Image (cartoon, rainbow, N blue to C red):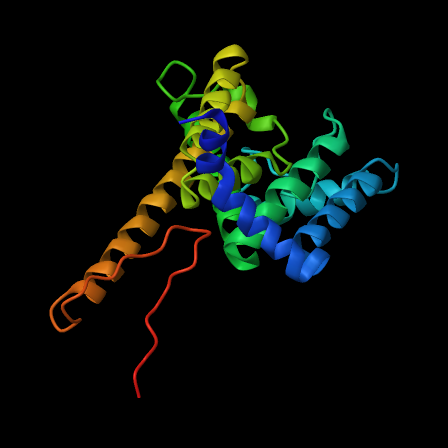
Amino acid sequence: MSPAGVVRAEWGPLYRAVRDGLRTKKWRAIPVTLAAVCLTALMQYVQNQEWGYQFVQNLGSVRAEDPLWLALLRTPLSLFVPALDLPVWGALGQILLVFGIAEITLGWWRMLVIGYVATLAGTLYARLGIWLGEDRPLGLPASDAQVVDTGPSAAVVGLAVFVCWRYRAWFTMALVIGAMVAETVIDDNLAGREHLAAIVAVLLLCGVSALRQRRRSGMWSGPGAGSGSTTEPRPGSASKRPPSSS
């Protein structure tokens, strides 16, 4: 297969889905993504003000040392609180690109659910890792309990993996996972470990989704469904049905 053919096989269905969504609805295709970008920019502005820093911390700052109920309450908003030690433009760009693609291809509510699951997986792993201790496999040092855990990165990684799985972009999916593993190997810190936890959680979601699709296909092609078998079309492609006879 030629390089162009490889690129079309990898990204063709995803590209067409995003192109068609933007062509028909333009910016109305990603209203939740745009709202997330604006909210993140607002949080960045407020937390950099002398009067607003503690306010934002109280709303969306998560630490493993916090009570679990408080961490769970703050986790949804923590996605939109950029890390103070990283450029905010990186967070805004990640949200616009990855959230936007996910909103077009998966729908806004699936995008939010998957992003939240990925973020929550990282938050809960931090508590588990600290409980295990740094001397055990998957453990973390006790000092990580005081690390502020905010930002959209876990959600971005999780959404990227799920979209790649949904559209069979296997090389890109492997690249994303490999990059996160390499990040952890090079600089083993809480953020890198949480990214891996997010990937594991989303891969489990992929497995559950695949099982549901398989059961659906089995119901359609089972006894009483007719002599023909029904297969789900590849994402990004249109299924052709014969015209019904009157």
Q: Compared with residue 201, is residue 38 higher up or lower down, i.e. above or below?
A: below
Q: Pick the quarter of the image with the N terminus.
A: top left
Q: Compared with residue 36, is residue 188 higher up or lower down, i.e. above or below?
A: above
Query: Closest to the observer: 222 or 65?
Result: 222
On the image, the x and y values in percent for residue 33 come to: 66, 51
Q: Tally the numbered discs.
A: 0
Query: Closest to the observer: 103 or 109?
Result: 103
What residue occupies the far right of the structure in this picture?
50
On the image, the x and y values in percent for residue 169 come to: 44, 36
State left or right for residue 79 relative to residue 130.
Answer: right
State left or right for residue 196 relative to residue 86.
Answer: left
The residue shown at (70%, 31%) is: 83
Query: Closest to the observer: 24 or 244?
Result: 244
On the image, the x and y values in percent for residue 97 come to: 65, 41
Confirm whether residue 140 shows in the render: yes
On the image, the x and y values in percent for residue 157 come to: 53, 35
Query: Closest to the observer: 84 or 5?
Result: 5
Confirm whether residue 68 shows in the render: no
What residue occupies the far top of the structure in this picture?
186
State left or right for residue 51 relative to residue 114.
Answer: right
What residue occupies the far left of the structure in this picture?
223
The residue shown at (70%, 44%) is: 58
The residue shown at (38%, 50%) is: 234
Question: Quarter-wise, where is residue 162 in the image?
Answer: top left
Q: Pick the quarter of the image with the C terminus.
A: bottom left
The residue shown at (87%, 41%) is: 51
Question: Quarter-wise, where is residue 49 in the image?
Answer: top right
